[in-house]
Amino acid sequence: MDGYLGVIVIVAVVALLAAGGLFLLFRPGRKAAPPVKPPEAPVLPEEEKRPAGAGEEAEGATTTLPPPPVKPAEPVVVEPQVEVPPPSAGRMVRLRSRLARSQNALGRGLLELLSRDRLDDEVWDEIEESLITADVGVAPTRAMVEELRTKVKVLGSRTQDEVRGLLREQLLAQVNPDLDRTLHVRKHGERPAVVLVVGVNGTGKTTTTGKLARSLIGDGKKVVLGAADTFRAAAADQLQTWGERVGADTVRGPEGGDPASVAFDAVAKGIEEKVDVVIVDTAGRLHTKTGLMDELGKVKRVIEKKATVDEVLLVLDATTGQNGMRQAQVFAEVVNITGIALTKLDGTAKGGIVISVQRELGVPVKLVGLGEGPDDLAPFDPEVFVDAILGE
């Protein structure tokens, strides 16, 4: 009996414990347990990431690779196109109309005055004034007027053609067609001819040097340019551009360097390349005559160690008139000028500077600039010049 009671007690205790557990589990207000998250994959650095399926041999697996780096395109170097300039022969004839436009006023005025029925002192004074205004110069003007007065007295009555003939004769005599206007650019055996270009900055000196190179190359010559104006970097750049257009090498030095050294190197390159002509562009500073003399004298002496200086061309701006004459005189005292290149002759009615500059310096005008185009530099022709002044 005691054993039976013991079993009942044990069963009752177990039942009570089971009931308490169920109460705790399902009691009101109890929160549900949070869901269990699956473990996250470790985050790998960028360089350790691999595309899905990498290292697996599963059928159909695809591997995506990054695109190859794009190589930057190399810059395209465009070689400057070499131009073929026209020959110098006949250029002034082709450019005569430009000259006539600027000089015709002088010619018309003189013809009108000389055609008057009565030529008294007042008319002759007007003729003289017209010539002086055109920069013919006082001495040449007086000589012309005196000669014209004498011939008009001999003729008596004058037709238009006779007046034109008289004036043409006198103008031509003052321009002096007998002067040697040959540009000396013939090489000496293995040595090239050397042309030294001098003049004040602003007269068109560097441009004239480039145009002269074009003209000579148009005549079939091979040319080297020397940028000895080392005080203006723009001058060397400009000259090099002119050279590249026509296939002429340009020798240049550091900005502010020794001009004589550049001139020497240019002549040396000319000899090495067996060219016909070396053209040297010099500095045009007129700070003092002594400084100019020292600089140009040194350039000339250094060149003569390698070759002969065949031409010293003085570049003058025709529009500067008598101021240009004073510049010319300074350079004439410094260096032995052999010829004059007169620029901007188409832009002034003062073409008489051709007469006055030749008379003052005793050297001929050999080249004239008749426009801004690359081929507007022409050998000076006295007859074409005078005919352009008088018109048709």
Image (cartoon, helix red, strand yellow):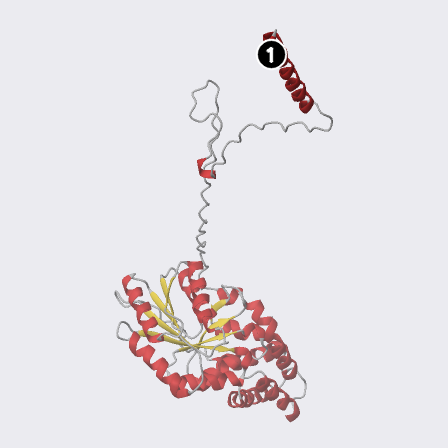
Residue 303 can be seen in this image:
yes
Which residue position holds label 1?
6
Which residue is more in the foreground, 260 or 136? 260
- x and y percent of residue 353 in the render? 52, 81
- x and y percent of residue 182 in the render? 39, 72
- x and y percent of residue 118 in the render? 67, 88
Residue type at mark 1?
A: Gly
Residue at figure coordinates x 48%, y 86% from the top left: 326
Residue at figure coordinates x 45%, y 73% from the top left: 232
Which residue is more in the foreground, 125 or 36? 36
Check the image and report above or below for 308 versus 81.
Answer: below
Residue 356 can be seen in this image:
no
Is 269 on the left or on the right of 158, as rendered? left
Check the image and report above or below for 89 versus 361.
Answer: above
- x and y percent of residue 121 in the render? 64, 93
Q: Quadrant of residue 185?
A: bottom left
